[in-house]
């Protein structure tokens, strides 16, 4: 899967004021619960399971942080794109 | 009532919602699950133990759903906290890890849950951001409601309080405070919490006088 990593990952910047806090993490986790395989958030080399609020919070992503989203299975491409949209829209805050 | 027994105490806490109220104190003796037994589960019973855990989570989650549906109109804007709690019940780091611990260590669900929660607590304690440290309270509320279901402890049913009282508690969870009915609760006193805690926000929304962060309140009153 390694050579296709670029195809299945996106870099996004957190734009909402509160950063990845409980509510935004819950919105991500809810979306990812429909994924067929794992979806990951990566920040500074640390990897968090995007289906877990607790894991997302443990990354500590305030406003302005840049994170990479990665999927393990290409059938989750739709979810990956939805996530990018959700984060870039600032979670509707 | 005879005046000879008159007794006055003055206590000071954090004022989170101003106002004056007079009424009887309704002491919430939190039947917190502090002592958790540890015992081993035989291989044949592991699946039953996992089932017991899953059903405790389901009950707690169903109860929360019920509370969400019954939440009064003026508190609707706070519902996202309860929705977050609902997602937390099935969080891999809590739900998945507890099941994994039951299986791997062959221990009872209560013990497994307690261990998983204390690991998560340690992780949050080391976070640089006070906001994130505060999220630990959400995880504690969620895990406590699972624990209460596991051991069959009585839970506080704020909705069932019949008379007008001042609620005195160690702490109130968002699920508990969203059940507050204005005509029943005159004021709030809790040992934990402060201006930015969920209880404080709810008290201001409902305009109920509240003093939080009043240490030992449940012992002194």
Image: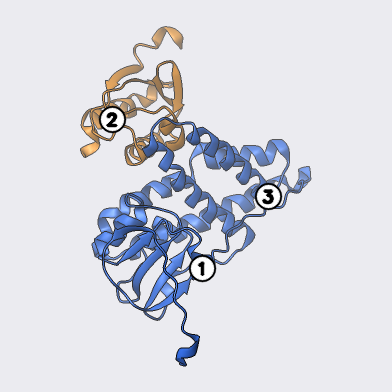
Chain colours: A orange, B blue
Query: Left of B207 or right of it: where is B100?
Result: right
State whether residue A13 appears in this view.
Answer: yes
Chain under numbered label 1: B
Which of disc 1 and disc 3 is earlier in sequence? 3
Q: Do the residues indicated by labels 3 and 1 lie within the same chain of the protein?
A: yes
Residue found 33% across the figure and 39% down from its top: A27
Q: Which residue is mark 2?
A: A82
What chain does mark 3 sit on? B
Q: Which is more toward the observer, B80 or B52?
A: B80
Q: State the image coordinates of residue B1 (x, y, percent, origin top left).
A: 45, 92
Dot 2: chain letter: A
Mark 3 touches mark 1? (CB < 8 Å): no
Residue at mark 1 to residue at mark 2: CA–CA distance: 53 Å
Residue A26, quarter of picture: top left
**SS at circle 3:** helix
Please identify the quarter of the rendering in which residue B30 is found.
bottom right
Residue B72 in the image: x percent, y percent?
A: 29, 66
Q: Is residue B88 left or right of residue B94?
A: left
* SS for dot 2: helix
Residue A46 position within the rendered picture, expressed as x and y whole percent measured from the top left:
45, 20
Q: Which residue is mark 3?
A: B49
The secondary structure type at the circle numbered 1 is helix
Residue occupying image coordinates x 39% and y 37%: B130
Q: Is residue A11 above or below residue B35?
A: above
Which of pointers 3 and 1 indicates the residue nearer the eye? 1
Task: Give the vertical position of A53 relative to B80 (above or below).
Answer: above
Which residue bears the numbered disc 1? B220
Instruction: Write the residue at 21% across / 38% down.
Output: A92
Query: Up-down: is A34 above or below A47?
Result: below
Looking at the rendered structure, whether the residues under marks 1 and 2 are on a common chain is answered as: no
- B201 vs B45, left or right, is left
């Amino acid at each position: 899967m390694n050579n296709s990593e670029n195809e299945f990952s996106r870099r996004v910047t957190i734009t909402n004021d509160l950063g990845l806090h409980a509510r935004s993490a819950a919105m991500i986790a809810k979306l990812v619960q429909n994924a067929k395989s794992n979806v990951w958030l990566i920040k500074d080399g640390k990897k968090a399971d995007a289906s877990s609020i607790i894991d997302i919070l443990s990354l500590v992503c305030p406003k302005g942080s840049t994170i990479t989203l990665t999927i393990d299975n290409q059938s989750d491409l739709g979810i990956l794109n939805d996530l990018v949209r959700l984060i870039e829209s600032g979670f509707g805050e | 009532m005879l005046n000879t027994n008159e007794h006055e105490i003055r206590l000071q806490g954090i004022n989170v919602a101003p106002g004056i109220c007079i009424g009887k104190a309704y002491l919430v003796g939190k039947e917190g699950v502090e002592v958790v037994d540890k015992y081993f589960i035989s291989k044949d019973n592991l699946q039953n133990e996992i089932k017991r855990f899953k059903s405790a989570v389901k009950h707690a989650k169903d109860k929360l759903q019920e509370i969400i549906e019954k939440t009064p109109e003026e508190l609707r804007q706070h519902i996202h906290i309860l929705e977050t709690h609902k997602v937390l019940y099935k969080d891999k780091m809590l739900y998945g890890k507890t099941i994994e611990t039951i299986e791997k260590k062959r221990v009872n669900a209560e013990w497994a849950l307690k261990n998983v929660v204390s690991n998560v607590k340690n992780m949050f304690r080391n976070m640089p951001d006070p906001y994130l440290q505060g999220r630990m309270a959400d995880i504690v509320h969620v895990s406590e409601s699972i624990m209460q279901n596991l051991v069959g402890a009585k839970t506080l049913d704020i909705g069932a309080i019949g008379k007008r009282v001042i609620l005195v508690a160690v702490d109130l969870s968002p699920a508990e405070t969203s059940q507050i009915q204005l005509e029943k609760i005159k004021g709030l006193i809790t040992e934990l919490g402060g201006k930015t805690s969920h209880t404080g926000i709810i008290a201001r929304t409902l305009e109920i006088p509240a003093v939080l962060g009043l240490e030992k309140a449940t012992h002194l009153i």
